[in-house]
């Protein structure tokens, strides 16, 4: 099994899904066999690659659908997608009421992700059971943070949950990095937030920052990753640089 990234933040609107889609696309373009798992009942990662959500979640036992049967090839070579389902909200309920379900679904996921170099979970904006399951199935946690006044809000709670899971998975789950998104270099507030985040978290903050770029939103509405929709845009360049930084980490490791 390769590297498994949980891209999560309990806050919405921080660029989490955009990062999941764009990074998965960039990694696949680097010739790495990549799987994007849409764990969010909003299914934006699925539509962001131009596909429709599943009618039934493959994680519900009654459907009896092997994950390998619902994984589809995206337009980008080497990129596969496990589409989201709005019924995934039902899985959250199952996980809340039946602890045995988490073990069963974790087993399904481990079997499905085995062939891939990189796996990325796009999680819902919460610290609920779906996000915790994705964390438990991952090797690294990535946290996108929007460059705004409340950037640090809620991070303490999120890090507490992550540390709890790390204790259950010693030496298996680590902080992959914190990513600054919606970065506007013309604003002094952006620089203040960047300084604060880098001083507090140190080396786990990515060197790469993701700039504000309207083309990124346009790309999602066309069902295309930003690198395909506007390859010369600031957003596309930033995600390519992020991909290179991640690949560089693999070489150094």
Image: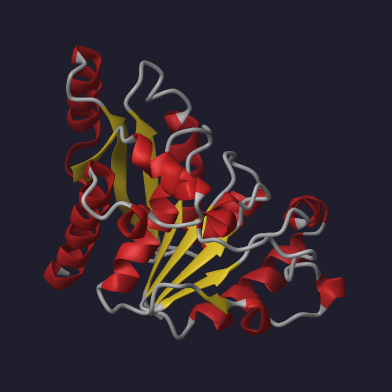
Residue 182's x, y, as percent? Answer: 32, 32
Which of these two is toward me, 81 or 191?
81
Residue 13 in the image: above or below residue 177 = above
Q: Residue at x 25, y 21 (%)?
A: 193
Quadrant assignment for the N terminus: bottom left
Q: How is the image coloured?
A: secondary structure
- Name the quadrant containing residue 139: bottom left
Specify the farthest residue to the left: 252
Q: Residue at x 37, y 50 (%)?
A: 142
Depth order, front residue of 98/14? 14
Q: Is residue 79 above or below residue 44?
A: below
Q: Is residue 239 left or right of residue 55?
A: left
**Residue shown at the point (67%, 84%) measured from the top left:** 69
The x, y position of residue 120, in whole percent, is: 45, 63
Is any part of residue 163 visible from this angle?
Answer: no
Q: Is residue 198 above or below residue 122?
A: above
The answer to whether one can see residue 34 in this image is yes
Question: Residue placed farthest to the right in the image?
Answer: 62
Position in image of residue 41 (x %, y %): 68, 50
Instruction: Measuring from the top left, give residue 102's x and y in whole percent.
Output: 69, 64
Total numbered labels placed on residues in the image: 0
Q: Is residue 215 above or below residue 195?
A: below
Left or right of 14 on screen, residue 56: right
Q: Which quadrant is home to the C terminus?
A: bottom left
Left or right position of 102 against 21: right
Asked whether 59 or 44 is in front, the reply is 44
* Residue located at (18% from left, 54% from top): 241
Of the pair 144 and 77, the residue shown nearer to us: 77
């Amino acid at each position: 099994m390769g590297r498994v990234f949980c891209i999560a933040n309990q806050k919405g609107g921080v660029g989490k899904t955009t990062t999941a889609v764009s990074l998965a696309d960039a990694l696949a373009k680097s010739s790495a066999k990549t799987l994007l798992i849409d764990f969010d009942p909003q299914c934006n990662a699925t539509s962001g690659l131009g596909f429709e959500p599943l009618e039934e979640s493959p994680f519900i036992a009654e459907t009896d659908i092997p994950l390998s049967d619902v994984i589809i090839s995206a337009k980008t070579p080497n990129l596969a997608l496990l589409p989201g389902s709005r019924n995934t909200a039902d899985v959250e309920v199952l996980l809340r009421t039946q602890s045995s379900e988490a073990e069963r679904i974790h087993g399904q996921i481990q079997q499905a992700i085995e062939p891939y170099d990189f796996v990325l979970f796009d999680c819902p904006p919460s610290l609920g059971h779906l996000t915790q399951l994705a964390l438990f199935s991952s090797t690294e946690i990535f946290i996108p943070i929007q460059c705004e006044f409340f950037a640090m809000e809620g991070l303490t709670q999120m890090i507490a949950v992550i540390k709890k899971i790390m204790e259950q998975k010693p030496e298996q789950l680590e902080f992959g990095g914190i990513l600054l998104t919606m970065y506007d270099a013309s604003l002094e507030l952006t620089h203040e937030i960047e300084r604060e985040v880098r001083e507090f978290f140190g080396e786990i903050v990515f060197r790469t920052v993701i700039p504000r770029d309207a083309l990124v939103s346009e790309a999602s509405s066309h069902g295309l990753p930003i690198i395909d929709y506007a390859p010369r845009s600031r957003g596309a360049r930033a995600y390519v640089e992020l991909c290179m930084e991640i690949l560089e980490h693999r070489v150094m490791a």
